[in-house]
Amino acid sequence: MAFRIKMIMPLVALFLVAIGYPLGYSFWLSLTNYRITKPGQTEFVGMAQYQALFDNAAYWEALIVTGTFMVIAVSLELVLGLAIALALRRQVRVRNMTRAFLLSPMFITPIAVGLMFRFLLNPQLGPLDLLLEKLNLSYDYFGPGNAIFTIALIDVWQWTPFMVLLLLAGLESLPRAPFEAAKVDGASPWLTLKSITLPMLSSVLVVAVLIRGLDAMRVFEYVFAITRGGPGTETQTIQYLIYQTGIQFFRLGQASAMAYMVLAIVLVFVIFLFRAINKEARR
Amino acid sequence: MKKRKGGAAAFIAAVTALSLAACASSDTAETPAATETTASETTASETTAAAELTGTVRVLMEGVPDTDVVTALLPEFNKLYPGVTIEIETAAYDQMRDKYVASFQAPESTYDLAIIDNPWMDDFADAGFLSPLDDQIANTPDYNYEDIAAPLRAINEVNAVTYGVPFYNYVLGLIYRTDLLAEAGLPVPTNLDELVSTAQALNTPARAGIAMQPQRGYKIFEEWGNWLFSAGGSIYDENGVPTLDTPEAQKALEAYITAYNSAAPADSLNWGFDEALRSVSNNQSAMMISYNWMLPALNKQNDISGDLAGKFALAPMPGGKQVLGSWNWAIPANASNPDAAWAFISWITSPEIEKARVIAGGAPIRISPLSDSAVAEAGFGADYYAAVAEMLANSQPLSQGPNGEEMIQAVGTELNSAVAGTKSVADALAEAQKQAVNIQGL
């Protein structure tokens, strides 16, 4: 065996144990009817769990809810993140303190953020409701039609700083010459943004959206801490459904199939996205 | 679940008083000499056996005041069983089931003693996770198992085998403000229509008529189940088949939605136990349907209700029947020290210790303490215990049979959809019925 192959073997071994085994075992579970409360009655069912998902309305509804959440949250995070990053790039005083303060939400564990907003938005305890009450207004944050937006806004609060971090790093790595040339030519800030900044930042933007999009697919904690999927099934995201199926209802085989189907969908999405990026880059 | 804080001092005093009372009664009892000899021999051998029993009993419990009451009892247990150590680990509700399931499947259980919520009982028993307890119950002297409320005993029986002994009940009832009802000149509601009209009559701009708990899943089903019973409906028929799309269920859900829209706090669709309790204790709502043991907590001086303490009363649900829940002691099939675990179960649920536990604030499981004047005097009053006795006698759990947790969540989702207005009452109930039948394989 070549030396370079030998050198990589520890990493491969670690990968197989730490990642390969759980993935392989959960895939095996997805091919069985394994139920935690039915020990000794597990049977190999092949692709039956996957086929059943196509008729499982709750599964597809949860995927749509998750997709809706992802689009709302990531769009807002992108716009806000870019605006804040552009502003921070021009900041002169107390730069470090401002950046540290802005980044702080993403260092809080999401379940704590969920609980925090559960109380902040509570009509009995929350300061926002108190303020609205004084203005003779009211808003049902977790009511029908509103809950998914509220959950998405909580995500925006926590993860916009991540977008800021990525975009600011991207902005600060851009060459200065095109911007100086644009300034000399008298280009407006909007034109500079549209014609120089955004095109030059496109690869960073794509990566940022991709990372945040994939991360948003995993949303669970806010739902668990606040809405438990309600009202009705309006905030029942795919991760919450998988948790309920596997952990709460003990059907680990079915939950594994659900998770693998999500993985397949995400992989297809990512492959198409990267192909599109590569095609764009070759132009 | 949250409840009042148990008083350790009250508990110790109660245990001492009850022990003295037991000694006094045995001293004065007029029994034949032969029987006395046999009894004393039995007692001596039991005491010796208790003293010789050794080991550690590890148990996972929910971090609630009932656990504190049990913890306060442990020194008394160790006077009788000096060789047995009870190690209590506490966890939040959501963690408990996961930890137990993992432990039950290990070659040797992490826990020698478990507390099981009633929706889990059938699944855990069917899976072989729990040890049958019929022999231990039958062979424990003076245990008086029949004194435990029948609906609570029934929760622990799966296919005619007993897998658990009740730890504490959480039967629900109507908690209301006596002063507000008197001001309005209204009686305690006795039927569903009166419940709605009373809530509406008590509703003012400053205070809601009734704090409700329509949160998706367990909470709404647990609350609405009481409305269903009040409407004359049932969750299952006599053959154990769900009956959730009946005219009674329709009436109950329509009444529930009417009350929510006209007499509940605004924007409370996501409310559960904590929010409803906070609303009632802060003078923001006049009534709520909640656990019976919330009444002493609400009426406790200088506690959660402030100046409102003493103004709350408990009544059975209009119509007389209510939803029952219970936590239950059980021994994992793979427990390493089942004898010591049973010694603790049989001690903590024994008639004498039950009285002390109830006086200290534990939710009762036995009937006899509820009519005991000593308990009423040292505890929370005869009226409260009479109401609890009446409620326990006519109560039923949300689920029976397999997959109880899933069935409850599915029905609770449909009910919440109806209250949110995203489904019609008829559609929600039809779907609830369909899912309940499907999930429970009926």
Image (cartoon, coloured by chain):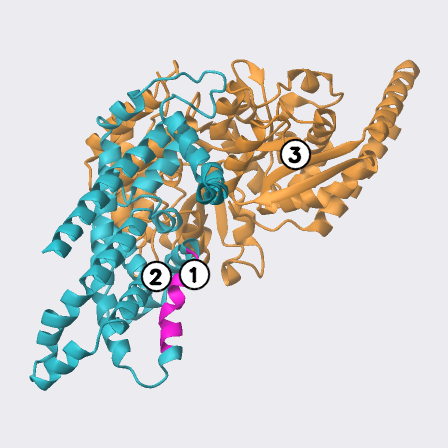
Q: Amino acid at mark 2?
A: Gln
Return the chain for callout 2. A
Q: Which mark is residue A108?
A: 1
How busy is the neighbourhood of tag 1: few (under 14 within 10 Å), some, or many (20 plus)? few
Task: Indicate the chain coloured orange by its letter.
Answer: B
Return the chain for callout 3. B
Does dot 1 land on a helix, a strand or a loop? loop
Going by the image, does A281 lie left or right of B203? left
Inter-mark Cα distance, 2 to 1: 8 Å
Of callouts 2 and 1, the N-terminal one: 1
Q: Amino acid at mark 1?
A: Ile
Q: Colour of chain A?
A: cyan
Name the residue that disc number 3 marks. B369
Q: Residue at x 35, y 41 (%)?
A: A240
Task: Report the front residue among B281 and A107.
Answer: A107
Name the residue that disc number 2 marks. A158
Does dot 2 land on a helix, a strand or a loop? helix
Does dot 3 land on a helix, a strand or a loop? helix
> Which residue is farthest front?
A2
Position of the C terminus of chain B, as image quadrant, is: top left
